[in-house]
Image (tube, grey):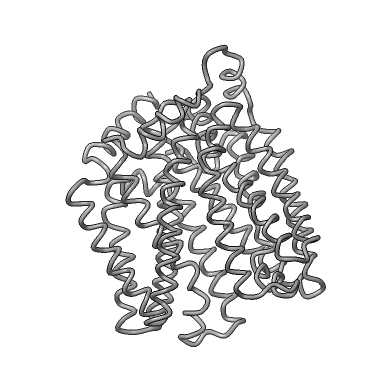
Amino acid sequence: MRDRFDEPSFVLIYYLYMATLSAGFVYPITTQYQLRRGLTYGQVGVVGAVFMGTWVLAELPTGYLGDRFGRRRLLLGSSALNAIVMLVFVASRTFPAFLVATFGWAVAFSMRSGAGSAWLYDLLRERLDAGEYARVQGTGMAVMLLFTAAASVVGGYVAARGLTYPYLLNAAWFALGVPVLLALPSDVEDAAEDTVGSGYLSPHEAIDVVRTVVTGARLRSFVLYFSAFFAFFEMVDLYIQPVAVAVGFSRPDLGYLYAAFYVAAAVVSHNTGRIRDHVGVRAWFLTVPFVVVATFLVADLSPLAIVPAFVVLKVANRVSSPLMEQYVNDHLDADGRATGVSAVTMVAGLAAILSRTAAGYVAELVGPLSMLVLFAGGLGVILAVLAVVSPPVPAGYDAEQRVRGATADD
């Protein structure tokens, strides 16, 4: 394992790029801002649904564009579009205007998901070691989370002087991502782009990649397993605030709760590489989701136990995502990695839309807290069946990767 204090310069610049992806300045006030601009609660809900739906629909097209025209180019476009979208939010005063801004934000988000994963994987493969992906990506995520925690405090302070100021700050911060990306190596991408007939996926080849990821024997069970867990996380994320208030949290307390989320997730994200090396992808996915389920079931006995359950879920999700990307990237050829990761994200996003929709109806009947307990029990049953029928990660995967890493080091 490489010493974190002895990182190559391009990895350190990558960490700075990850920080520029944070929307921390606006996180504390997005709903309040929309309400102040005249939107109803129902319209705020529609805006949130548009974000998720657009993200899901844009995943495959943007992943394909990254494979076809260059991943760093797509990341540059994502940072620029994010900055523009923040300015559109500043100018938005009607429901349709917020829909347009949200649509753009979701597209910008999807532009960097699959492409960012594939680009980093290939960059590490050429300049360091592809086996370092989980560690580097996890540390980068930790940097982003810590900055988000600090930016949220600044954003809340600035918002007291005007709700548009956080958006202006975040526009400038997103724009900083463009020069930071330009400072990162481009030779890996250029080598593919300058080779006629290679480095490009045709639409037919892109469909084959999607078919391999979604229905192929090597990844099918893993995609289903990860999607079930991801759908539970996205559903719970909608109900953290009302449930926390119901168990006694005041509105100021929520700020401290979210700060705890970010700090805990940052610490664990920073150690994603160690988790991959010492725990393994297989052991992680066969144990941690069930630990999450158990923490939510305990909340049925003591409502206050839902708070540590939220923290455990946030932490588990932050580690599971880079481990998923590592596993999927390890099973795909270089030309289709962005498309493949985007395919997994799309399937998981579709599952999240279903879980969010169903959760709303169930919460109306039994209340948000009881709904979370019921869904946790259902998740446990689904994951147990999938693990028994078709284990998501084969038994020899981690040992094979350790041998490959040792060979690369030699």
Figure quadrant of residue 207: top left
Residue 189 percent across, percent down from the top left? 59, 24
* Left or right of 178 in this view: 305: left
* Left or right of 55 in this view: 375: left
Nearest the viewer among 126 and 306 is 306
Figure quadrant of residue 233: bottom left
Q: How many marks?
A: 0
Q: Farthest left residue? A: 388
Whether residue 34 is situated above or below residue 251 in the rendered picture: above
x 40%, y 45%: residue: 324
Nearest the viewer among 182 and 343 is 343
Residue 306 percent across, percent down from the top left? 40, 77
Whether residue 66 is situated above or below residue 163 in the rendered picture: above
Residue 144 percent across, percent down from the top left? 59, 53
Nearest the viewer among 31 and 307 is 31
The quarter of the picture where the C terminus appears is: top left
Q: Farthest top residue? A: 196
